[in-house]
Image: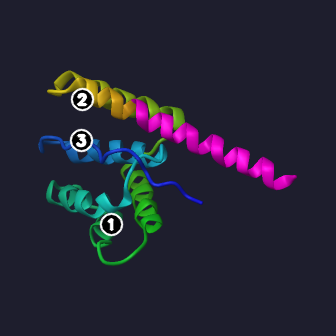
């Protein structure tokens, strides 16, 4: 049983310079943490292409609107991040970037409390899902 991502798509950013690469990295962090809705990826990839982030995987992801499952989209994102050199060596590294992004969003948000609550709820939901799956495995063994 898989859980549905509970986190919002990465915050939109102003489109200058290396922002598409930064957004790819933030999206990869959200993917690693299980916080990314794969349905948002084709639109993000089309924007990355428009911003000059060219790669075979980003093009395939941009075209994944009518084909491919969420798993395919997430795999294409992981490959695009690897190809661009913005992948993560560990979950802790991805979590650190995600936390930094949330803190930055809080500093510029009209509603920083909402940003903090979304961040907190994402991790609570992730942890609850892991505990539920672990308990389910233990109970099945009996």
Q: State the residue at coordinates (47%, 48%).
A: 34
- Of circles 2 and 1, which is in front? 2
Residue 51 x/y as whole percent: 15, 54
Residue closer to the observer: 16 or 67 = 67
Residue tagged 3: 11
Q: State the residue at coordinates (22%, 48%).
A: 20
Residue tagged 2: 105
**Colouring mode (rainbow / by chain / secondary structure / one colour):** rainbow
- Are the residues flagged by discs 3 and 2 in contact, CB closer than 8 Å? yes
Magenta span includes 122: yes
Residue tagged 1: 61
Q: Secondary structure at mark 1?
A: helix
Q: Residues within 10 Å of mark 3 (few under 14, many from 20)?
A: few
Query: Residue 109 vs residue 133: left or right?
Result: left
Residue 141 x/y as whole percent: 84, 53
3D distance between C-alphas at marks 2 and 1: 26 Å
Magenta span includes 107: no
3D distance between C-alphas at marks 3 and 2: 8 Å
Q: Main secondary structure of the magenta part?
A: helix
Q: Give the magenta range.
A: 120-142
Q: State the residue at coordinates (46%, 33%).
A: 95
Residue 90 x/y as whole percent: 54, 38
Q: Earlier in the sequence, mark 3 or mark 2?
A: 3
**Farthest right residue?**
142
Residue 113 versus residue 138 in the image, above or below: above
Q: Secondary structure at mark 2?
A: helix
Q: Earlier in the sequence, mark 2 or mark 1?
A: 1
Q: Earlier in the sequence, mark 1 or mark 3?
A: 3
Q: State the residue at coordinates (38%, 28%).
A: 99
């Amino acid at each position: 049983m898989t859980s549905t991502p509970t986190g919002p798509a990465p915050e939109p950013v102003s489109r200058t310079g290396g922002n598409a690469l930064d957004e790819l990295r933030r999206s990869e962090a959200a993917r690693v943490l299980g916080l990314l809705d794969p349905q948002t990826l084709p639109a993000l990839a089309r924007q990355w292409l428009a911003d000059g982030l060219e790669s075979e995987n980003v093009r395939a992801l941009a075209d994944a609107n009518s084909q491919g499952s969420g798993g395919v989209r997430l795999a294409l994102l992981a490959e695009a991040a690897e190809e661009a050199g913005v992948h993560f060596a560990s979950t802790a590294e991805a979590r650190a970037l995600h936390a930094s992004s949330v803190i930055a969003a809080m500093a510029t948000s009209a509603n920083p409390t909402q940003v903090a609550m979304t961040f907190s709820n994402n991790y609570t939901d992730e942890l609850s899902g892991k505990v539920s799956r672990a308990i389910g495995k233990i109970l099945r063994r009996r």
